[in-house]
Image (spheres, rainbow, N blue to C red):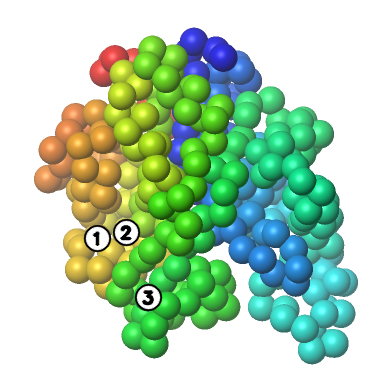
Amino acid sequence: MNQRTVVALSGGVGGAKLALGLTRILPPDDLLVVANTGDDFEHLGLTICPDTDTLTYVLAGLDNTEQGWGRRDETWSFMDTIGTLGGADWFRLGDRDLALHVERTRRLRAGESLSQVTHDITRRLGIGPRILPMSDDPVRTRVRCDEGWIDFQEYFVHRQCRPVVRELAFEGAGVARPQPEVMAALAPGRARAVVICPSNPFISIEPILAVPGLRAAIAASGAPVVAVSPIVGGRAVKGPTAKMMEELGLAVSAASAAGRYGDLLDGYIVDEADGAGISVATRAAPTLMKTVEDKEALARTVLDFADSLA
């Protein structure tokens, strides 16, 4: 295990942008990306891992940059046919993307762990850094709305975030075991930094921290913990972050997002307009990552800040 590992906690789109920036400035063996699996679900008989797959496609250079999710140069014959047959076509699986889900599901049913499957697929796609799930045990995010509890993808994709969020729960988290390589990277003295990517705190990062032992391991690692705010200019860059904050009675601000991590943080990267009311050390930087150069520049800022806090 490398003695200078940067451990990055990540959800999907926003987290993958910073993860890509980190891959451009770190040797492959010096970066471990911990993927949220709370979004995972079973669909059409297949195990779908949205955040892991977004990270995989982005780091492999296969992502659809215009759409923000899925693979580029995608075709949709399978979904068009499923719809014609009356099947569930609300969660769009492109033909190229489908191959990954079929192969993952086959190997999981054959007895391989999610970590083993993910590691092999990322290597076959030419990704150097490790991408590992937070746990090989199933953890599923659930959303309580006015009608009761529903699965996260039902809320997020099928209903397009329309229901009012009253509460979140991470089913299975209480008995899930943290991924062993992740825990080894977080052993005292082993990590250079822990980076919390600019992902939704509620549905991307908190499921990771809900796995028993992970939050404590981060706190005991001795590495500086630096988060990047998902809020820019008082607004969420993408997804339902701001809507969730409002519905859960929180101010839509970088400070509120930081507050979700409690005393875990040593430092917080915020956009130039968002530094008020934060109790930990902050550094202002452009956090809106539109180009590869933006991603690399923010990654350099994050690591420089973390090193200054070590």
Which residue is painted at 38% across and 12% down in the image?
189
Can residue 180 be seen here? The reply is: yes
Please determine whether, in this image, residue 113 is positioned above or below residue 174.
Answer: above
- Image quadrant holding the C terminus, namely top left
Amino acid marked by disc 2: Arg
Q: Are marks 1 and 2 in contact (CB under 8 Å)?
A: yes
Q: Position of residue 88 (x, y in %)?
A: 72, 81
* Left or right: 281, with 144 as reference point: left
Q: Dot 3: what SS?
A: strand
The numbered disc on residue 238 is none
Can residue 254 be seen here? The reply is: no
Q: Position of residue 295 (x, y in %)?
A: 50, 35
Residue hosting label 2:
235
Q: Position of residue 82 (x, y in %)?
A: 82, 80
Residue hosting label 3:
144
Q: CA distance from mark 1 to mark 2?
A: 7 Å
Mark nearer the viewer, 1 or 2: 1
Q: CA distance from mark 3 to mark 2?
A: 24 Å
Q: Are marks 1 and 3 in contact (CB under 8 Å)?
A: no
Most foreground residue, 191 or 257 = 191
Residue hosting label 1:
252
